[in-house]
Amino acid sequence: MHEPLPPGRPPLSTFEVVPYRPEGGFTAFGSLLLIVASLAAGLVLGTLGGIISRWFWLVLIFPAVIGAGVGGVGYWAIRIGHVRSTILGVASGLLGGLFAIISMYYMQYRDFESSNSIPPDVRQQLRELARLTPAEVEANPLIPPEVKQALRDPASRAGFAVHDLPSYMHFQAVLGVRISSSSDVGRKDGGMNLGYIGSWIYWALEVLIVAGIAVAMQYVAAKQPYCSECQRWKKARQLGTAPESQIEPLKQGDLPVFAEPLPLQVGEREVLVTANICPLGDDRCPVDVLIQRLVQTKEGFQQVEIAHVTYAGEALPELEEVFARRKLPPTKEPLAERAGSAIEQAIRNPSSGIKSQETGVGDWNRRADGTENG
Ligand SMILES: [Zn+2]
């Protein structure tokens, strides 16, 4: 069925392959580190955000930066603390993101209290009056007319009633968040007022952005390949590229298909194949094979996962052989015309694995793998 092997090259075997699954484990130390680090990052970045918002605020952008900050710290903690549980990754990202937003608005609440010029005992009286129903206020002869007048205004009433963060947020919602342009919130003047409900929706959106980004980053960190045998994160090594038609045999462990490298069909794209290998590895450590499509974007290439499977460790030499074989015959048409120079570099780089990580293609991977022992 297959053409004869080139003389001197080892035969290729069929391997049992299972879908990749995150390892899922965690340690008490790692979990604690992750939660504490996420909360601390949320506290620091949220407080900073609260301070910066005294002067200006970039809608959607600042929440995204805070989310990325919390996610980045969580990513670091996950790598250091060996957290492979995606549930923990998601939970800590959520906690850190929520904490960041709470810290930010708590900072603004503190600013509100400290800038308030009403003497504390008067404020306390006004607070109590603001808790009365409008009818009770009107019926009370002891309340001076000007205070009654002020209490009829919903914003003043909500302002008098502020005594904690939720009541401060209620007051801010009564005033209404104002957005003067897509990149700026003018807090007191100008712009479109989002109204009471709109303000709460806006804050919910902020929470979604901050927590969403933090959760996504920490989830990705926790699902990275990990060797249970050696208690180490695996390292990515680019094996090379393969035509799209060969994704299936790679996913099935059907390596004899690759005895003779299939030529790339006209119009067919290539996929990038990366092996995640235990750094202490011997052949007992499973190898995770990640197949990605390179999608060209304005910024360069984006890697999109197509398949992720796990081979037994002993498959690694044969997998490497498959891709070494692909490089044997000189390519007839210039690869650059088919799939861009990044793939060409990946396939032509003589020391395919580690070194190709220095190219543009590898950079993404390295960042995703960032904290690996420096
Ligand atoms: Zn191992």
Image (tube, grey):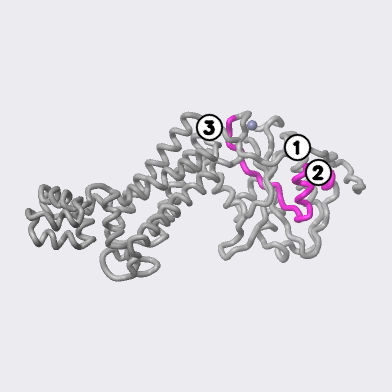
Q: Residue drawn 16% across and 53% down?
A: 136
Percent across and percent down for residue 56 are: 31, 62
State yes or no: discs 1 and 2 in contact (Cβ < 8 Å).
yes
Give the SS element for disc 2: helix
The question of residue 184 being in magenta is answered with no
Q: Is residue 182 left or right of residue 158?
A: right
Q: Residue drawn 75% across and 45% down?
A: 251
Residue 54 figure quarter: bottom left
Magenta segment boundaries in residue numbering:
231-258
Q: Residues within 10 Å of mark 3 (few under 14, many from 20)?
A: some
Looking at the picture, which amino acid does disc 3 mark? Phe
Q: Which mark lies nearer to you, 2 or 3?
A: 3
> Mark 2 or mark 1, which is nearer the start of the sequence?
2
Q: Which mark lies nearer to you, 3 or 1?
A: 3
> Mark 1 or mark 3, which is nearer the start of the sequence?
3
State yes or no: discs 3 and 1 in contact (Cβ < 8 Å).
no
Looking at the picture, which amino acid does disc 1 mark? Ala
Quote the CA–CA distance across marks 1 and 2: 9 Å
Q: Is residue 278 left or right of residue 70?
A: right
Which mark is drawn over residue 255?
2
Which mark is drawn over residue 26?
3
Q: Is mark 3 within 8 Å of ligand 1?
A: no
In this figure, which residue is indicated by the disc labeled 1? Answer: 315
Q: Is residue 334 left or right of residue 26?
A: right
Front residue of 267/241: it is: 267
